[in-house]
Amino acid sequence: MSPSALFANGSTVNDHFESGLNLSLLGLGVEYPPYRVGPEALETLANRFYPSSSALQKVLSINRFTGIDTRATVGPVDHPLVNQSDAPSIKELDDFFRKEGVRLSVNACKKAIQEWGGRVEDITHVVATTCTNSANPGFDHFVVKELGINRNVEKVLLHGVGCSGGLAAIRTAANLALGSTHRRKPARILVLACEISSLLVRSELDSINEEQQTRIGVCLFSDCASSAILSNGIGDHQATESVYELLGWRHEILADTEQDLGFDVDPSGWKVVLSQRVPLLSAEAVNPAFHKLIQSIPGVHKGDAAPSAADFDWALHPGGSLIITGVEQAMKVSSEHLRASYEIYTKYGNSSSATIISVMNRLREMGNGKEHVVACAFGPGIALEMMILRRRMRGYLQNGKGKPAQNNIQQENGAPSPVTAHENVENGTSDAKEALANGIKAFAANGQPVENGPSKIGSLPIEDLD
């Protein structure tokens, strides 16, 4: 495509997206670590190392009703790093991430590259993100080295974007790809997100014990790496099938909310910052952002009428139960529209930036649905990321590309789990929704009312976390 054609047909001037962007995701890859732990794991560690207190007992009560059946973790409850006398230091966490985080990332990238079907040497850019490691050089340096990608590949490592990082990385890659299109050059961009949150359990329990804070991030977070290949279409073979086509995106910061959501650095890891306002702020922001984004993409309109939220499937980052149900209610959609978000949440928990690609991957595995998909996530700032995608499920199913690899997931005792990541969604969605509803009802009956809770994290029965 010529530069003049790009700006004539694919202009994003004034947040207006025309057809002709030619941006596609050609492969997705998700790698969860080989262990699953249930709610009892947190209780085991709490009883093993900390005295009983009102704050701890409240957290443990909440932990039983999050709606999460199991969380994917890098080790069992007896993992040495979380069973030493003190919480692991940042150096210990960094040393572990450089090994296990890189390993998870390489495996996720290999899956995305395999589905794409291209050559590693054709990768032109790498856009990566994490909020659970901050060393230099970044973890992406070692992933590139392990994959054998050219040393002159253009790399970008996003920091400070938390749970919105997966979509922020895709948005960044999309803009890089448009720049390459303007230069008449091909772009094959490897997008990567990796988080290891489970090893922060002792740091969070320390704060609960020492400060008597009700911190429930310790009940929700999990570990994952996910990846995607984004192309600008230049040089693609005609037979190349996309998983999703990118039609447009929106990024915005909610005014005066930087104190509501964050991830602070601490000598023993990172600490979640979360106010009571987060679920309501998030739910209120989605509707106007959706309508502004839809107005900027005329290609999704039905004649003169703009589509409604129910005309789309939704790939929502499952930061917590209230964020999912809040968006569901605000947008007047059903749990079926959010089926992939519910399933990933109940089976794996919140893996921060890596989760959204996992949700997008699970959604396409569930079979044909709505032609268009809204992907949405929230991060520190508070930042909202939203993207409109067009699915290409027919080609995916016909040519057999991207057949999901079986995850080697184990229970905390090391035995293979009887539950896989690819069960029938007809059962999974209803079970997930019922579990969330039961959890909220149980806490409402037995827990402390929201209005009596502390002003910071944990004041809601099942909080929505970055």
Image (cartoon, rainbow, N blue to C red):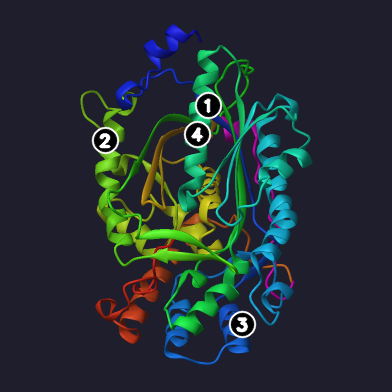
Could you tell me the amino acid type at mark 1? Answer: Leu
Magenta stretch holds residue 402: yes
Residue tagged 1: 176
SS for tag 1?
A: helix
Q: Main secondary structure of the magenta part?
A: loop
Sequence-first disc among 2 and 4: 4
Could you tell me the amino acid type at mark 4? Answer: Thr
Discs 1/2, front = 1
**In the shown orientation, is residue 87 left or right of residue 366?**
right
Sequence-first disc among 3 and 1: 3
> Which residue is located at x 52 percent, y 42 percent?
364
Name the one closer to the observer, 333 or 147: 147
* Residue 290 image offset from top left, x and y in percent: 30, 40
SS for tag 2?
A: helix
Q: What is the crowding at mark 1: few (fewer than 14 residues within 10 Å), some, or many (at least 20)?
A: some
Could you tell me the amino acid type at mark 2? Answer: Lys
* Residue 317 image offset from top left, x and y in percent: 45, 52
Q: What is the crowding at mark 4: few (fewer than 14 residues within 10 Å), some, or many (at least 20)?
A: some
Span colored in magenta: 395-414
The answer to whether residue 331 is seen in the rendering is no
> Which residue is located at x 65 percent, y 35 percent?
400
Residue tagged 4: 172
Residue tagged 2: 292
Q: CA distance from mark 2 to mark 4?
A: 20 Å
Magenta stretch holds residue 280: no
